[in-house]
Image (cartoon, rainbow, N blue to C red):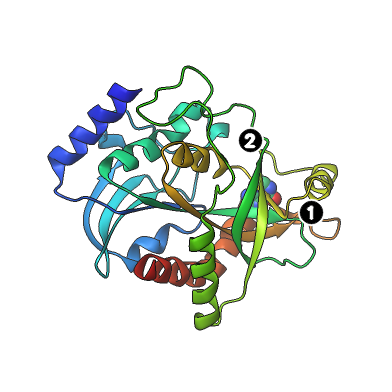
Amino acid sequence: MWEQVQETVSYINGKIDFTPEYGVILGSGLGSFTEEMKVEYTLPYNEIPNFPVSTVLGHKGALVFGTIGEKKVVAMQGRFHYYEGYSMTEVTFPVRVMKFLGIKKLVVSNASGGVNPNYKVGSIVIIKDHINMTPEHPLRGKNDERFGPRFVNMSEPYSRKMIAKAKEIALDLNIEVFDGIYYGLQGPTFETLAEYRMVKILGADCVGMSTVPEVIVARHMDVETFGISVITDMGNEESIDTISHDEVLEAAKQAEPMVRSLIRELILKY
Ligand code: HPA
């Protein structure tokens, strides 16, 4: 995998002259974040060697390079999910590539189902921790020390400093944010009512099908990471009947301007 990552990085560096400091992974319905950027280059995934190609509606597939103020950013417009059939190595491959393009910090966004009764559809949650219940660990297999250590300390999967800065920014911008624990499952089914209850009992606030593998791999390589989630549906008895991908995309769209501003300001100020 080391060679594949280096090959992809060499290809990209041959195409563009740009060293990003920040990586951003844009989740369901949040792809318009690139409008906050002064875009310099766009590389569609299907032109990048060794990159998987996204298969889900609402997820575009391109690496977008540009600036926010003075900050250099590479954004993944569209991500890869385990439920699409990719291995965890494939799901997290772009994170490895971004690291070797130069990123020091990663911002990950997603849509998730809320189980914390204080949340409602459209709530914005700063992820403070996660519970990994995905079926394959992205670091399973022989460890390559050039990426990071065999046993990764996970005491701070989400940067406490970035969380504090984001909360400060949210206050300034008058955007209501929660913090919460994200429960990572493989999907692609939404949870049953019993499963939403389990997620809640096990100590999480929201549940989704992404983010956890990418964050683990970022932390393997000592990339400082920030996660943000939009609650697009509530996993409870009153709401469960209508949960659908359309509802998820619609709710993510509603929250998109606020999430965009928050991430923009975080990148500018941190
Ligand atoms: N469950 C899992 N993933 C999700 C959900 C959900 O309720 N909403 C958006 N992504």
The span from disc 1 to disc 2 (Cα, nearest Å) is: 19 Å
Residues packed near mark 1 inside 10 Å, few (<14), some (14 to 19) or many (20 plus): some
Q: Which residue is mark 2?
A: 186
Q: Which residue is mark 1?
A: 240
Residue 57 x/y as whole percent: 49, 46
102 is higher (above) or lower (below) than 136? below
Residue nearer the viewer, 262 or 142: 142
Residue 212 x/y as whole percent: 57, 42
Q: Is residue 71 visible?
A: yes
The kind of secondary structure element at disc 1 is helix
227 is higher (above) or lower (below) than 264? above
Residue nearer the viewer, 40 or 227: 227
Q: Is residue 246 visible?
A: no
Q: Residue at x 56, y 62 (%)?
A: 252
Q: Quadrant of residue 194?
A: top right
Q: Residue at x 53, y 65 (%)?
A: 253
Residue 30 x/y as whole percent: 47, 59
Residue nearer the viewer, 165 or 192: 165
Which residue type carries mark 2?
Gln
Q: Is residue 79 left or right of residue 65?
A: right
Q: Residue at x 67, y 58 (%)?
A: 180
Residues packed near mark 2 inside 10 Å, few (<14), some (14 to 19) or many (20 plus): some
- Are the two marked residues, 1 and 2, in contact with CB atoms closer than 8 angstroms? no
Q: Quadrant of residue 95?
A: top left
Say whether disc 1 or disc 2 marks the residue closer to the N-terminus: 2
Residue 11 x/y as whole percent: 19, 34
35 is higher (above) or lower (below) than 197? below
Q: Is residue 118 left or right of residue 161?
A: right
Which residue type carries mark 1?
Ile
Say whether mark 1 is within 8 Å of ligand 1: no
Which is more foreground, mark 1 or mark 2?
2
Q: Residue at x 39, y 66 (%)?
A: 270
